[in-house]
Image (cartoon, rainbow, N blue to C red):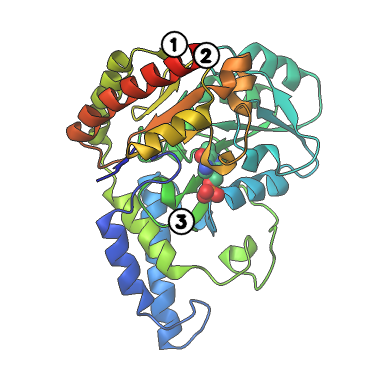
Amino acid sequence: MPVYLDANATEPLRPQARDAMIAALELPGNPSSIHADGRAARRLLEEGRRRVAERLDARPQDLVFTSGATEANALAILGLGRGRRILAGGTEHPSVLRAAPGIGILPVQGDGRIALDALERALREGGAALVCLMAANNETGVLHPIDAALRLCRQHGALLHVDAVQAVGRIALTMAEMGADSLAISAHKLGGPKGAGALLLRPGLDLAAMLPGGGQERGRRGGTEAVPAIAGFAAAMAAYDLSAAARLRALRDRIEQECGTDVIGADAPRLPNTTCLLLRGVPAETQVIALDLAGFRVSAGSACSSGKVGPSPALLAMGLGADAACAIRVSLPWNASDEDVDRFIPAYRAMRDRLRASRSA
Ligand code: PMP
């Protein structure tokens, strides 16, 4: 049996999400129809909205369902960023960095965290800004100091959008506690289906739709809502259990201790399930392919850019230079077992020794 260690690309579907989706597929109505079938679909949709919002301590009316986090990030940036300078951390996901032209890039420190002094300087330079920062990085798991960044944003009248895709379901996080202006999340990163996500807005904040369409989602996102996917999303939100973090962290720490290689971002606070292992001089793709052949699914860089040859832009932004092309990401899914890790460690060590030897041969 292959071992799946690529949770940050997509988490395995949770059984509760699959069951909820299958049930929702049986409902014929469009949630915008006023007849009984439409109202049944609407009930399911609104129940999903309530459950997703509640888990993040947000109000249901402040949640906009989208097709995923790429769309949620773009909606925040195009909607809230209108008339503002847009600033984003150098290790942000391409769905942020490419959402609009002319985004100003903020440097990160060597450990992957945003350089707060550079953020402050950029905010002082004038003009209202929208700052985009991820709660947790998809490649390294490094957590940005969102509280400190938010304080700076508030001092300078800037808005803060947080891409919380990799953090929700893995570390404690709520919209109310975080206090950001908007938050993007994605169902498939927490055990729900691919193709559903949400943008949560601070109470009182509104934005113009990117897709006006038929005025769905309180006019913030046109298009018939993906009711079955949203039902699965809500079930996955209800199902995740933050107490699993300690178990995953222990497994991740074992990988780091026993694989005998450098870990990128190890000095910063990180997600419990993620490690970014550096094997100097060996291209990440070679490592991923060798491990895949041995039955282990890991990734080089972010899944969105895998298949592309070359160094990871996020690792380059951390100042890794040539090493940015030689790191793989191992991300433990919610259902990772001790046995998965027992099998991975010797496979990694064998791969490392073989590829190092062939490099020096
Ligand atoms: N942000 C981050 C940090 C991600 O890891 C991803 C998925 N790779 C996205 C945004 C995009 O999410 P989606 O797949 O839902 O469009």
Q: Is residue 222 left or right of residue 50?
A: right
Query: Badge 1 local density, few (<14 within 10 Å), some, or many (20+)?
Result: few
Q: Is mark 3 on a helix, strand or loop?
A: loop
Mark 2: amino acid:
Asp
Pointer 3 or 1: first along the chain: 3
Q: Is mark 2 on a helix, strand or loop?
A: loop
Mark 3 close to ligand 1, CB under 8 Å: yes
Mark 3: amino acid:
Lys
Give the label on residue 267, or none: 1
Pointer 1 or 2: first along the chain: 2
Please name the residue shown 70% across and 29% down the image. 157
Q: Is mark 1 on a helix, strand or loop?
A: loop
Residue ranking furthest to the front: 361
Q: How far apart are marks 1 and 2 (CA)?
A: 6 Å
Q: Which residue in the protein does label 3 denote?
A: 194
Q: How far apart are marks 2 and 3 (CA)?
A: 31 Å
Q: Distance between the residues labelled 3 and 1?
A: 32 Å
